[in-house]
Image (cartoon, rainbow, N blue to C red):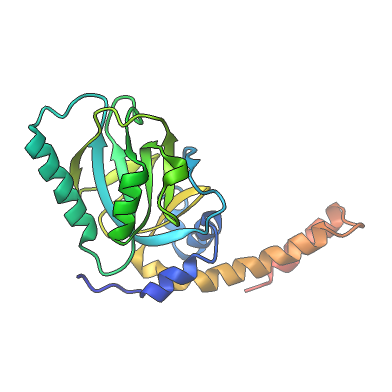
Amino acid sequence: MVARPYTQADLDALCAWDTPTICNALELVVPARRGHGFTVRTFDCAHPSMPPICGPARVGTIRAQFPSGRTKEADRASRIGWYEYVANTDMPTVVVLQDLDDVPGTGAFWGEVNTNVHKGLKALGCVTNGSIRDLDMVAPGFQLLGIINPSHAYVHVVDWGRPVTVHGMQVVHDEVVHADRHGAVTIPADAVKALPAAIDLLSRKEAVILEMAKRPDFDIGKLREALAKSDDIH
């Protein structure tokens, strides 16, 4: 496995904050990332109350609108190849699966079987523009962000290991992904360890404004005062 500039403990620590908070911190730590690197469309979330997930990405593509045109044996080999790719990891991962169909979400790759299989292969969940189903039978603790639809149609694995784009978020193999009910964001490897300190700073700056805003005598003058105090926190 490739050496990483972060540990599992570092990724676990980031799960204490929701994905919008991670996005805020990235604006401070990696200012050039402010306008990209996150999903920009709404997902259906299988477990809205579940804590965030965070891990290196396993990326792949699927189609479901039409049959693959391959033999049954070739389809099975492709599916096994995907599973072998997902299983090749030294820490829990986040799957990012792009549906290439003209109508993404025609058929669901994710349901009772695949959530349990992938959980067994150390995946924490999946972010996809494709379909999810079997919501009452999803593997416990496995998060799904996708489109809710009932059928798997002709779903089949196309490729894996190459860059994918899901709802505007481009992801490459092993890139750190943080996700919750709000969506997902990629985190540069070198930024992982810097995020907790950035979140602490932003929280302290916001606390001054929030405290003032909740006062019964709050007005525009108090807002100016709070903004000035917030600017002085470093």
Residue 117 in percent (x, y) is at 29, 53
Would you say 22 lies left or right of 163 here?
right
In the rendered view of the protein, which quadrant contains the C terminus?
bottom right
Residue drawn at 75 percent across, 60 percent down? 210
- Quick one: 88 or 138, which is closer to the camera? 138
- The answer to whether 64 is drawn above or below residue 123 in the figure is above
- Quick one: 229 or 81, which is closer to the camera? 81
Residue drawn at 41 percent across, 39 percent down? 134
Picture quarter containing residue 108?
top left
Would you say 1 lies left or right of 223 here?
left
Residue 44 in view (yes/no): yes
Residue drawn at 30 percent across, 44 percent down? 97
Residue 148 in percent (x, y) is at 44, 34
Picture quarter containing residue 169?
top left
Residue 115 in percent (x, y) is at 35, 49
- Quick one: 199 or 229, which is closer to the camera? 199
In the rendered view of the protein, which quadrant contains the N terminus?
bottom left
User: How many discs mark residues in the rendered view?
Assistant: 0
Residue drawn at 92 percent across, 57 percent down? 217
In the orientation shown, which residue stands out farthest toward the front? 137
In the orientation shown, which residue stands out farthest toward the right? 217
- The answer to whether 39 is drawn above or below residue 125 in the figure is above
Would you say 30 lies left or right of 209 here?
left
Residue 223 in percent (x, y) is at 80, 57
- The answer to whether 153 is drawn above or below residue 62 in the figure is above
Residue 175 in view (yes/no): no
- Quick one: 19 or 78, which is closer to the camera? 78
